[in-house]
Amino acid sequence: MIVGDSKPLEEILEMIKDRPKVLVLGCRGCVTVCNVGGEKEVGILATTLRIARKKAGLPPTIDERTLERQCDPEYVEELAEVAEGYDAIISIACGVGPQFVSERYPTVRVFPGINTTFIGGALEHGVWGERCQSCGNCLVHNFGGLCPIARCSKSLMNGPCGGSANKKCEISPEVDCVWHLIVEKMEKMGRLQELAQVWPVKNWSTSRDGGPRKRVREDLKQ
Amino acid sequence: MKSGSNLEKMLSAGHFAVTGELGPPRGNNAEEVRHKAKHLKGIVESVNITDNQTAVVRMASWAACKILIDEGLEPNLQMVARDRNRIALQSDLLGATALGIKNVLCLSGDHQRFGDHPEGKNVYDLDSLQLLDTFRKMRDEKTFLNGKELDGAPEIFLGAAENPFADPFDFRPIRMAKKIAAGANFIQTQCIYNMPKFREFVKRIVDMGLHEKCYLLAGVTPLKSVGMANYMAKFVPGMDVPDTFIKRLKGVDKKEQAAEGIKIAIEQIHELKEMKGVAGVHVMAIEWEHRAKEIIEGAGLLPRPQV
Ligand code: SF4
Ligand code: SF4
């Protein structure tokens, strides 16, 4: 899923400071699963904003709404009747949300209420980790099912580097050295010999480096 | 001969080689480079010029190399994969070799998180092995990475680094073999303090026959003080400084610690000289270039043979 983090309250208050009528807009997709932008978080953020604005003597009108998905025009359309009545919409979906909403309602100011951080998964309750950088050419099966592009701090394809110590990455004792994990896993699988080959340079053109990407499925297009 | 550099000639003649290291200044102070270089002239085969080491911005490595050449020293250009993509790396190699640089050391580079611009974006288009492979290809096949022919191919003696003390230990010799397969003609190691562990590493290298495919230069860095030893032990990732050295430095008067550190370095070199599979030493007297001579002389390695 796409994982995000709430923006600091002060930053959001500053965004909407001169805007009397505000809508907090959630999404039932990834951000609901990672507890940052679903219906529950919409309620919490709206309440917090109301209290803070009331305290500051500002209009406390903060409405709440959660769409099925903000990355689908079909659902964004549901705001057609109301969107223009707001001075600000705070989207707490991933970065796609504020873009789709402002594209559809160009006269309304749309603000991002969360920081989209990475593509990852839940490691335990309340903890998420990065797993993929959407490089456009998945290779994880060659590395014991672990992604060196997203999880090695230097995206090394021939690691581990000289900074790997006690299974941790040189950048922080909080970060696992994925290359240590790759070596361990491949050894356990009896595949260590596969790591003895030099991995050739990667073709990054399928990644963001090739420019913004678009996927077209002719069979699905209408 | 790959490049006919002094370092390559010395190693292929079977002499125990000595290399040094010099960090360019944090400014364009060319005089500082000349000053440091003076201390290393005539006592080492070639001098590694670091490339924005620890991700702190410094004078470009290739430029400091050129200053060394003008001063009559042979540089070893370090290049990290952190800051440049394949376009810039290949271009810089062409420029560097056009200026007369003959030794190049390929590294991945320290992550910028600890440098002086931690908010920067890193590149890592290639890793250190892919960088070696690219430069080897430019030299041997006379083509760019994309297969297109070069108008003038670089002649270089290619190097890589290895840290025998990084984890996982058992994988290190395999990774060194990969570096050789990718094109490394010589390998310089991280500073060695844990000699028994290094001995084990070299034994594995020799068992694999890697010492016959590539020259291994063992890294030696004198400990200047207890403070430095403690810092290296605690804060430098992948550095292994046994307590015995820290105790030994603590055992002498503060004023004598530097001399004791030099004594330790000399003892280490004596030990390394006798180790099968070790072709030379890489003396990294960081910000201590003026003491390098004492160490090299003390280890009985002066005067340097002429080849
Ligand atoms: S190899 Fe690419 S697509 Fe696969 S997990 Fe890693 S970044 Fe994602
Ligand atoms: S320590 Fe491991 S994860 Fe960190 S940069 Fe080096 S190889 Fe990558």
Image: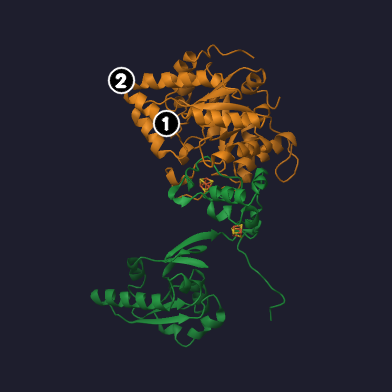
Chain colours: A green, B orange
Dot placed on the residue nearer the N-terminal end, 1 or 2: 1
Q: Residue furthest top?
A: B303
Chain assignment, label 1? B
- Disc 1 residue: CB within 8 Å of ligand 2: no
Residue of label 1: B242
Q: Height in image: B57 above or below B39?
A: below
Which quadrant of the view contains residue B285?
top left
Mark in front: 1 vs 2: 1
* Residue B205 drawn at (x, y percent): 62, 31
* Residue B147 drawn at (x, y percent): 75, 44
Which secondary structure lies at badge 1?
A: loop
Which secondary structure lies at badge 2?
A: helix
Residue B98 seen in the current view = no
Image quadrant of ligand 1 equals bottom right
Q: Which of B72 and B307 is in front in this view?
A: B307
**Whole-number angstrom distance, CA of label 1 to CA of label 2:** 22 Å
Residue B164 seen in the current view = yes
Residue of label 2: B255
| B115 left or right of A220 in image | left
Q: Which of A15 and A115 is in front in this view?
A: A115
- Which three-letter amino acid code belongs to the residue tagged 1? Pro
Q: Nearer the viewer, residue B282 or A74?
A: B282
Instruction: Give the quadrant of the N terminus of chain B.
Output: top right
Q: Height in image: A218 above or below B189?
A: below
Chain assignment, label 2? B
* Circles 1 and 2: CB atoms closer than 8 Å: no
Mark 1, Cα crowd under 10 Å, few <14 / some 14-19 / many 20+, is some
What residue do we see at 41% from left, 70% from top? Answer: A113
* Residue B39 drawn at (x, y percent): 47, 19
- Which three-letter amino acid code belongs to the residue tagged 2? Lys
